[in-house]
Amino acid sequence: MWSIRDCALINPLGADMAEQTAESLPLTESPTRTQSTFYRIWDSDVCYSFRSSKVTIVAAVVTAVIFFLAIFAPWVAPHRPFDVATIDLMDAELPPSWEQEGDSRFLIGTDNLGRDLLSTILYGTRISLIVGFLSVIFGLVVGVTLGLMSGYMGGYVDAFIMRVAEIQLSIPGILVALLLAGTLRGVISAEAYNEAIIYVLVLTIGTSIWPQFARTVRGSTLVERNKEYVLAARVIGLSRFSIMLRHVLPNVMGPVLVIATINLAIAILTEATLSFLGVGVPPTQPSLGTLINEGQNYLFSGLWWITIFPGAVLAILVLAVNLLGDWLRDALNPKLR
Amino acid sequence: MPKPSNQALLSVRNLRIEFPNRRGILVAVDDISFDIAPGEILGVVGESGAGKSLTGAAIIGLLEPPGRIARGEIILEGERIDHLPYEELRKIRGRRIGAIFQDPLTSLNPLYSVGRQLIETIQTHLPLNEREARVRALELLEEVGIPGAEERIDHYPHQFSGGMRQRVVIALALCAEPRLIIADEPTTALDVSIQAQIISLLKGLCHEHGTAVMLVTHDMGVIAEAADRVAVMYSGRIAEIGPVQEVVRTAKHPYTHGLMGSIPHIGHHVDQLTQIEGSMPRLQEIPTGCPFNPRCIQVMDRCLVERPDLQGVDQSEVACHLFDEAGLAAGAGE
Amino acid sequence: MIAFLVRRLLQAIAVMAVVALCAFFMFQFVGDPVNQMVAEDATDEDREYLREQLGLNDPIPVQFGKFALNAAQGNFGVSYQHKRAVSTLILERMPATLELAVTAAILAALLGVPMGVYTGLRRDGFASKVIMTLSLIGISLPTFLIGILLIYLFAVILGWLPSFGRGEVVQVGAWESNFLSASGLKSIILPAITLALFQMTFIMRLIRSEMLEVLRTDFIKFARARGLSNRAVNYGHALKNTLVPVITIIGLQLGSLIAFAIITETVFQWPGMGQLFLQAVQVVDIPIMSAYLILIAFFFVIINLIVDMLYYVVDPRLRVDQPTGGGHG
């Protein structure tokens, strides 16, 4: 409190002096006019905290590499693992190439069907990432919309939306996803289910993460709603909603980005878990979770690579995304440290 | 520079408080010196960001990192305390220097009864057992004017009103009869009607116990009412320090002058309240020379290059080039 | 206090009613239960007879009334897959899940809370940074992968612990326990660690951020300014004020443990409710799914009620409804 008072002038947010001076002060610094836009971005606090954290840089590089390889899997992968014509069962269960029985054609070995493990993993990561991204986007759109409505309309709408969000937050996402998946299996045929599986997963996982977005956006909307400029806009006959939207959205960009990043990691994990439990992506188009599930059965016979490599990729991917999320949270909101 | 006096209760000498950040060092308090005599109430006034609360925090050793005392000395009853280890300083806090914070609503732990918080503080500093400490706690509550102390002692903070809570906070500060109390904006968070009560209570109690007070506030009214002397701070420096009557009536520093001009006085006919143009510079943009020079209406060439030191004028000390021998003639008056 | 409890109880009943409705609609819209129960070559009369027997021709509100009444008495019908009463199936499996979940909860709380407090108090210490990094790895590894890795290390490579099942269980009345035989105890170690690890890191990280939050408050700064010892400030004041959120977190986590047990039980072939539920999801065995849903909701509601009551013990602001002195300043 001692420090807070003294800095009220330079610190409208009331954050601590310590953090204030260390983190956000330079943001308010007027940059010299000769500085280029690039330099200003490079010199900004977010960028500085990125540059000064080796772990974050490594995480970003790892994420970028994995994203790149997964997106371009059809071009990068050495084999086409789902093209039956190119698969030879004789190649099944080959260990990584550096082991005694390894085959130089298959860098990290093959799975039980003779598919090149590296290629399978690349395609699997692709599916995991697609599901993860789509789920987060779905959850984000639904959550931000409902949060805005909740905060703007208030009253019964607000109470209803927030109660639903609360109940949903208290139920583990994986359970919601399992129940939804199970119910859907009853409604549509198994074939249709497998065909639509990606959308089913996006729907179920997205549904399990929207409340966090909704709550954050609602809070910010409530703060903005009572500000004077909103009233002023109303007085001169502007739509209060559109005015507010223009002020609320920039304000929640930071937190929403943080929640999105952290939930990308969670969505990838949830997809993997559902696939591992056998209600996710089918083995014909395996994701990382499916691969681990399949490989698990061979662990006891010593075929460790079928499980360990997809597992490692999954863990590294999620860890990297989590690290980025952590960094982002600290960089955008030093108070949370 | 004020003369170091032997009878001073607290002496602050050339205190400098810095906040290092990645682009260098921000100087929040720069080379300030003042004394507080036993039993004296020193008001410290200034805008937010002037460094007044940081000075208070530095005295009780609760500057938050990365804030640090970069230079200077803090001397309590002849003993230097600014470089003491945490544990030594802890024993001084509460025992020899009490503290009162701005917001009584958040200063008390909501989960403990006020009695428990009082007893805990008393037992930390005084060799009393639980029962004796409770008796002392009751006395304190009565002393700060809480009616029905016997019953109220077991109540929780949320059961008290804001003014009553600030009384509890004062009781907590007085627990071990400290010689000095640092009161940081003690009335800012209170209703106007309660403010005067709390100030007169604080003033009365300190007078009775011979406790000195460093009263940090941005409210000149509070200073005029309670303080014996006042220090005006601007951009981490003392602009003017002196007896409260003199500073209020015949403000010397143009900044103080502006401050006084912005206060309406009942009974005085003023056509227009004056207002100081602009705002205090940010810490990283403090101009060379006198920090007030961009806003000063009497600015001179010298002010832009040379930082003024405190110099005695009448009974006060002022940091302003207007009072340099050469400048005196230029116009010290109204 | 009583008014508060009554309100909470009513809310709990409302939540249960909503969940029951969801479960009921699962029955209504997912498949025709008659198809699941009769033989392939049954005649239309047989089917109609069964419909009548099951009350499927009644109006929907009446059906729901019956369903809710039955559910309240623990009667969830007969499993399509197992052809046995769902309640019996669940009761048989419950001890396994509860023992696993409680063991994991104790493990998670005993390790997670102290680590959270420690990293909160010494946020810049070396040990804190190590713990925080490890915890990030902890929440990045999916539960099933942790289970698989543990099995690979301790069962396959080292051969110290069993890789699946409950081992020898000892019958105590109707309860089958793991804790009374050496083999049972050995069997529960890996699943319990697997289940506890994520919860532990979760609890730890949350307590840490709560501690950091509380340490920033004015009353902690004021407590320091009063000269209280570090011990009194950190443990007497800061820790006590983190208790309310911590109780909530641990309470809610206990509920989610039972849900997360689904994964652990699958990895370790642990014969609990989660495994039963997962099998039900795979073959769309609606009675088991709806019963499981209701049961989990019931656990949540009960835990929430207990958490609410614990608040009373911790937070005086809830104990006294009327401020006695002139309201809030």
Image: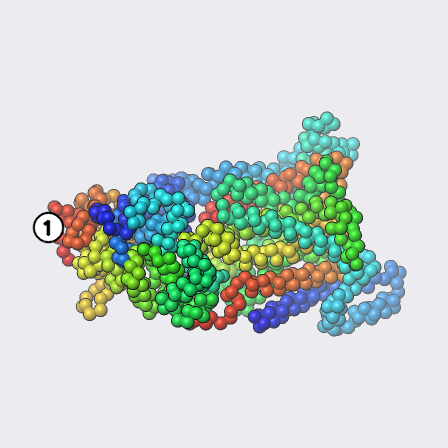
Q: Residue furthest left?
A: B329
Most foreground residue, A306 or B166: B166
**Chosen colour scheme:** rainbow
Question: Compared with residue C271, is residue A110 higher up or lower down, i.e. above or below?
Answer: above
Q: Position of residue B55 (x, y in %)?
A: 32, 50
Most foreground residue, B180 or A184: B180
Most foreground residue, B297 or C215: C215
Q: Position of residue B21 (x, y in %)?
A: 38, 42
Going by the numbered disc 1, the residue's amino acid type is Ala
Q: Which chain is mark 1 on?
A: B
* Quarter assignment of residue C243: bottom right
* Quarter assignment of residue A304: top right
Residue sitting at x 81%, y 68%: C54
Residue sitting at x 28%, y 52%: B9
- Identify residue for label 1: B329
Instruction: Say left or right for C218 vs B290.
Output: right
Residue sitting at x 44%, y 41%: A48
Instruction: Say left or right for B125 vs C122.
Output: left
Residue sitting at x 50%, y 44%: A327
Q: Position of residue A198 (x, y in %)?
A: 67, 50
Mark 1, residues whose alpha carbon is within 10 Å: few (<14), some, or many (≥20)?
few
